[in-house]
């Protein structure tokens, strides 16, 4: 693992200021994916910005009857939250289907959205990978690719996103709240992740100087009851 500078953000505004000053830096919360990537030399950030102490750990009701989930809510807390288990069991089941209990205890909700692919060639720095090094080629297309994508691929990349939780959030039509130097904005979950196209190195439509602050679930619409 390379040497890196470490800084801690005091609040969301401070986190935005720090990442805007150095877009090549990386935010770290639970670190369950980023640290693995750094150990394998796939990610080599010269600076890490610790956001683990920001006040983004609550699950709150929204005015329209949905839920707003703070970006730092641990996956285990979210899966077992009574309002999630009762109103959005699909999301609870998806979280519990992934990883181990130890990883779920550390992994954050926002970090889950930003996981990188588990494609073998992405992790193998000795092989070409357009997602890791744009323009180098895609070893997976003619290689071992059983875990890779069938739909939504391009000539540049056939990698898949590894998150079970994100599939549930897409089905639930969630929205992603982000903050950046220009203020706050909301991204429909269906528009958050990108297909590889000609830019497979970009996994999401989150700008390099933005931070995820929350995920919003719409109100659960119950089916109409049929009179007996």
Image (tube, rainbow, N blue to C red):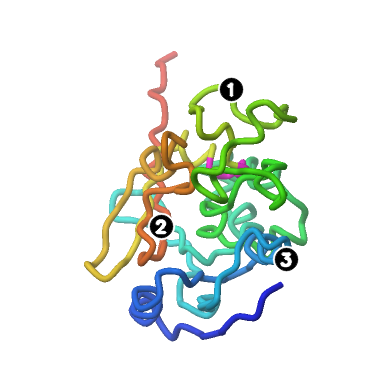
Residue 3 lies in what quarter of the image? bottom right
Mark closer to the chain start, 3 or 2? 3
Q: Is residue 97 magenta?
A: no
Chief secondary structure of the magenta portion:
helix
Q: Which residues are magenta?
A: 162-166
Q: Quadrant of the C terminus?
A: top left
Q: Residue at x 58, y 44 (%)?
A: 165
Q: Mark 3 packing: few (<14 Cα in 10 Å), some, or many (20+)?
A: few
Mark closer to the chain start, 2 or 1? 2
Residue at the disc numbered 2: 68
In this view, the residue in front, 89 or 49, is 49
Residue at the disc numbered 3: 39
Q: How much space separates mark 2 and mark 1, taking CA atoms?
A: 33 Å
| Disc 3 versus disc 2: nearer the observer | 3
Residue 220 in percent (x, y) is at 41, 39
Q: Quadrant of the N terminus?
A: bottom right
Residue 96 in percent (x, y) is at 69, 46
Residue at the disc numbered 1: 150
């Amino acid at each position: 693992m390379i040497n890196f500078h470490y800084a801690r953000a005091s609040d969301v505004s401070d986190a935005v200021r720090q990442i805007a000053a150095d877009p090549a830096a990386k935010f770290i919360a639970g670190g369950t994916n980023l640290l693995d990537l750094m150990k394998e030399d796939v990610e080599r950030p010269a600076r890490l910005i610790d956001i683990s102490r920001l006040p983004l750990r609550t699950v709150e009701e929204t005015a329209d009857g949905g839920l707003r989930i703070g970006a730092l809510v641990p996956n285990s807390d979210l899966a077992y939250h009574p309002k999630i288990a009762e109103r959005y069991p699909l999301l609870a089941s998806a979280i519990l289907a992934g990883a181990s209990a130890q990883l779920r205890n550390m992994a954050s909700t926002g970090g889950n959205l930003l996981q990188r692919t588990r494609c073998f060639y992405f992790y193998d720095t000795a092989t070409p990978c357009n997602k890791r090094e744009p323009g180098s080629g895609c070893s997976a297309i003619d290689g071992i690719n059983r875990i890779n994508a069938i739909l939504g691929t391009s000539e540049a990349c056939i990698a898949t996103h590894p998150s079970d939780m994100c599939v549930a959030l897409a089905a639930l039509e969630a929205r992603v709240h982000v903050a950046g130097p220009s203020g706050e904005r909301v991204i429909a979950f269906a528009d958050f992740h990108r297909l590889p196209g000609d830019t497979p190195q970009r996994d999401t439509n989150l700008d390099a100087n933005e931070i995820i602050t929350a995920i919003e679930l719409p109100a659960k619409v119950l089916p109409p009851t049929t009179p007996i």
